[in-house]
Amino acid sequence: MSGSPTPHAKETGMPKHQRAIVVAMVAVLLVLPHLLYPVFVMKVLCFALFACAFNLLIGYVGLLSFGHALFFGWAAYVSAHAAKIWGFPPELAILSGMACGAVLGLVVGALAIRRQGIYFSMITLALAQMAYFFALQAPFTGGEDGLQRVPRGTMFGLLDLRNDLVLYYVVAAIFLGAFLLIYRIVHSPFGQVLKAIRENEPRAVSLGYRVDQYKLAAFVMSAALAGLAGAVKSQIFQLASLSDVHWTMSGEVVLMTLVGGLGTVFGPIVGAAVIISMQNYLAELGSWVTVVQGVIFVVCVLAFRRGIVGEIAAKLKKPL
Amino acid sequence: MPDIFGIPPQALFGQLLLGLINGAFYAQLSLGLAIIFGLLNIINFTHGAQYMMGAFVAWMLLNWLGLGYWWALVAAPVVVGAFGILIERTMLRHLYKLDHLYGLLLTFGIALIVQGLFRDQFGSTGLPYRIPAELRGGTDLGFMFMPNYRGWVVVVSLVVCFGTWFVIEKTKLGSYLRAATENPALVQSFGVNVPRMVMLTYGFGVGLAAFTGVLAAPIYQVSPLMGADIIIVVFAVVVIGGMGSILGSILTGFGLGIVEGLTKVFYPEASSTVIFVVMVIVLLIKPAGLFGRAR
């Protein structure tokens, strides 16, 4: 594969307005735990990371995975198991969760990219359901109870994660690092090829790109980052459970990304914040939360396909 | 009668029959999905919810209006089909020119709404639905005892599946449908009202799902979650069979039901995953699906 430079090679750095938003985001992240309940903000960050990982596939390669809970949930199980049973320190527990996401992503991705379009989504959903049944039956996942009381431990032997605020800053750093990594991936020559595949796959093939390898690489990256989010989640809530691997979780990450804006840089973060806040405030409504989520899906698809950030970007005529 | 591979024949044939019934449900649901996809280019994620609605309409007719199974068999597909037509008219219609994925997302959203509403109304535990008096009891076939209702489900499903196949492959109406699947603009220019055909096709596919739901009501309990569980399996069935062939959908559905039934006998732990395993194998060997056109 020739790593030829893209026509837009001069756009290496982040545009000014995006850089300003990132700086503002860092500032907000520093202050936020003093204004809101840190665990809530961590939850938002964790799902924002999950949604960004998902957006890497749907937004930039045009692949709709309906099984991302598989990577999120299994990574949560593996890192919870590593921390609780093997006594791994948090950094290694999180890394093993991420590795689990990458390996599962390699297997699922290799199978799913054998079909295109709508079949791709159905295959990812079916494989995720299969993994759900494994989680239900396998002894080490704790079945219906899940893995509870996962110890938080001390990161690098220095940072005591039992303190919510310390954990918060660690989570925020992980989130920022992953966000910038995704930004870098998307805006690299590799990312340009991904977008070419999204726009016109046969043309990318005729230009000599090995489309399947690109798709698989993007899938593995997305799965690994989704795994990172799941692993972090099991550290925050000290819990890995069946709801993390269930298809409703896959649906939620789709919804967050759709609400924020498919294929936008900041959309998944906004979408995650909106959906998690909504769940938080509507929690007592029980099954109505599902109804509200369904209504948001319908409204977004019919009238609001660009999502919140996509609409703002279209108004400002600047990529966000 | 001697055991077969160490399994008492009654248990073996009982599970085979149950597998055949599940297969009948898979066949009818994947048939509906395939017909809808052919004409609308949309994967109908609401299919499971519409199957569940069929079962609930039957339950409501019985418990609220005192109308029994036979009424439900006719009324539920009509009611739920009308609901489908309403969705097609007001929402799906706007998505035909867009990417496939929006149709999937929209119908997923509708499925969440329907499921949430039913769960709020009826809770998530199953509600019983009695087998109609005419079909209670069973028949001794010599090698096994067959509950009459189960035999009825298999026979009716076969009739419905092959009836659908006949209409689509052998009648003039079906030829219009097949032509519109290939090239709607051309068919429209010959004076066929394609938008109406699309609408009725969706209504039919949805009605078929509701009909399946009524058939399922006495076997499984009527529950708001029954559709979500089955639709993902049906997706796997569709991936295995490919949506290009009507007969292929029917064969794949029944075949996989039997495979699942046999797994329940010989290795029950894998019975919930065996269809997904078959899907993986098919993807490795014949990525286009057993009856799919290579693409």
Image (tube, rainbow, N blue to C red):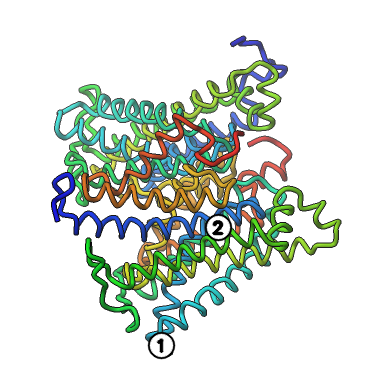
Residue A46 shows in the view: no
Q: Position of residue A165 (x, y in %)?
A: 30, 39
Q: Position of residue B174 (x, y in %)?
A: 68, 60
Report the amino acid beneath label 1. Answer: Trp
The answer to whether residue B44 of the structure is visible from this angle is yes
The Cα atoms of the two marked residues, 2 and 1, are separated by 29 Å
Q: Secondary structure at mark 2?
A: helix
Horizontally, residue A75 falls left or right of residue B159, namely left
In the image, farthest residue toward the bottom: B66
Q: Quadrant of residue B199?
A: bottom right
Horizontal side of B34 relative to B124 (left or right) equals right
Residue matched to label 1: B64
Quick check: A92 above or below B293? Answer: above
Which of disc 1 and disc 2 is earlier in sequence? Answer: 1
Q: Are marks 2 and 1 on the same chain?
A: yes
Q: Quadrant of the N terminus of chain B?
A: bottom left
Q: Secondary structure at mark 1?
A: helix
Q: Amino acid at mark 2?
A: Thr
Total labels: the figure holds 2
Q: Residue at x 70, y 51 (%)?
A: B181
A118 and B237: which is toward the camera: B237
Image disc number at residue B107? 2
**Residue B64 place in picture, x, y as percent:** 41, 88
Which residue is at a point 31% across and 34% down the rendered structure image?
A75
How crowded is the residue under tag 1: few (<14 C-alpha within 10 Å), some, or many (20+)? few
Q: Chain of mark 2?
A: B
Q: From the image, which quarter does the C terminus of chain B lie in? A: top right
Residue mark closest to the camera, 2 vs 1: 1
Give residue B82's position: percent from left, percent from top. 60, 73
**Chain label for disc 1:** B
Residue appearing at x 69%, y 53% in the figure:
B178
